[in-house]
Image (tube, grey):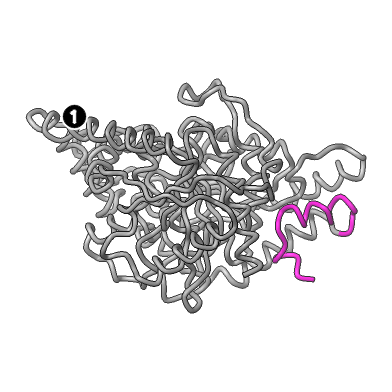
Amino acid sequence: MDILNLKIWELKTLIERKEISSVEITEKVISEIENRDKEIHSYLSVNPRAVQEAEEIDKRIARGEDTGILSGVPVAIKDNICVKGLPATCASKILENFFPPYNATVIDKIKKQGAIIIGKTNMDEFAFGSSTENSAFGPTKNPLDLQRVPGGSSGGSAAAVSANLCFAALGSDTGGSIRQPASFCGVVGLKPTYGRVSRYGLIAFASSLDQIGPITKDVRDTAIMMNVICGRDENDSTSVDVTVPDYTGFLNREVKGLKIGIPDEYFIEGTDRAVKDKIIEVVEKMEDMGMVIKKISLPHTQYGIAVYYILATAEASSNLARFDGVKYGYRTDDYTNLYQMYVNTRGEGFSKEVKRRIILGTFVLSSGYYEAYYLKAQKVRALIKKDFTEAFKEVDVIITPTTPELPFKFGEKTEPLKMYLSDIFTVNVNLAGLPAISIPAGSVGNLPVGLQIITPHFREDRLIEVASFIESYMKGA
């Protein structure tokens, strides 16, 4: 038995029976990272205390203590989530030597449940990208095909899970950055409702859109991770005090009669035919098994990319103003006055894509353009949210492809607009603050296809319910 192939829930059983120790698991994962991650490059750093932390878990288990539902499980963390004592670079030169003095709330939560932080994963710099090609420290490769991208910006997290270099990972999703790489790497990725999971300790990209979520090997593991990370946090004023159910209680439930909405706007011309066919195949099977399939319309879908890249860049421009070389992070050596230090630090520390988004965001917020771009985008955002509200009066869930294409090769999308369009099926979920999950829906050759499920606000229970049903069908297909 190769323990690296196991899911969290399977590993947990072995640990409880004392058939394997946390130290053995952790050492096995670190060894695998050392052997295989040279070619994948999913990690930017490995926790030097991981084995020591595993030893502490084993001692507590030996004393008969309750060490939590993630006891001894190695979990990877995207490098824009703060872990005390480990780097938090955001894959950027400007934060290359930044070590946060505190844990993000999600880190405290998973450590309380016994998780071992195995390391920090690669990403597009400051989460600006859809391929993990924009990392200042080199791209991550897709474990399923090393010539192709793993998606982004949480590409390192998705690749690490897919390659069995951890048992689960945390990522962040601003416009699809958990779901799209999960789709490309053939794993499960859930973006929770905005406010369901604390953002405290997440280095911000766009504060009204960002959300931390899990990437796992199957839906049961996703439910387990959601049980741990969800809930109100007094350190985050945007987190919401809504009851967190036991998501594992919604696995393998009867879903006969559930109304499934299929939006015409998500099966548009330009979507890969093979992707469409896989999603339609699953939908038809769901209908055969008693679900009610209904065609719906989300009429403002076409404006999502434009709205997203106006609002997200505007917020990024504001959030990234703090990186100026004064208090922390990189500082240029080439300056004679304060202004020159600002200019040279940011010029040398930020990549081309980051500069592009800062400039665009500053432009749409500037005098004379605010009303024409930013304010108008906010109004259209409200219309996009209303589309979903109206749709959910008719259906229980919405199903779409996660991405319009299969994983693409490195260098195929050098034009920024082509890269931005990779998120065409995911950004509107963030604009509306809704929860959504991507699960594998089969493959074309060795390339996976992701299916996206969307539900109303705070209905992650239904996401788990439907995703679990489809996963069971896919395993038996």
- Residue lying at 44% horizontally and 63% vertically, measured from the top left: 280
User: Residue 109's quadrant in the figure?
Assistant: top right
Q: Residues within 10 Å of mark 1 (few under 14, many from 20)?
A: some
- Choose between 407 and 35: the one closer to the eye: 407
Residue 295 is situated, as x and y percent measured from the top left of the image, at 38, 50
User: Residue 64's quadrant in the figure?
Assistant: top right
Q: Is residue 465 visible?
A: yes
Q: Amino acid at mark 1?
A: Leu
Looking at the rendered image, the quarter that the N terminus falls into is bottom right
- Residue lying at 59% horizontally and 36% vertically, measured from the top left: 106
Q: Is residue 111 above or below residue 78?
A: above
User: Is 59 left or right of 293, judged from the image as shown?
Assistant: right
Magenta range: 1-19
Residue 269 is situated, as x and y percent measured from the top left of the image, at 26, 64
Q: Which residue is mark 1?
A: 375
Q: Is residue 124 above or below residue 2?
A: above
Residue 102 is situated, as x and y percent measured from the top left of the image, at 56, 33
User: Is 124 left or right of 338, judged from the image as shown?
Assistant: right
Q: Main secondary structure of the magenta part?
A: helix
- Choose between 181 and 462: the one closer to the eye: 462
Q: Is residue 282 magenta?
A: no
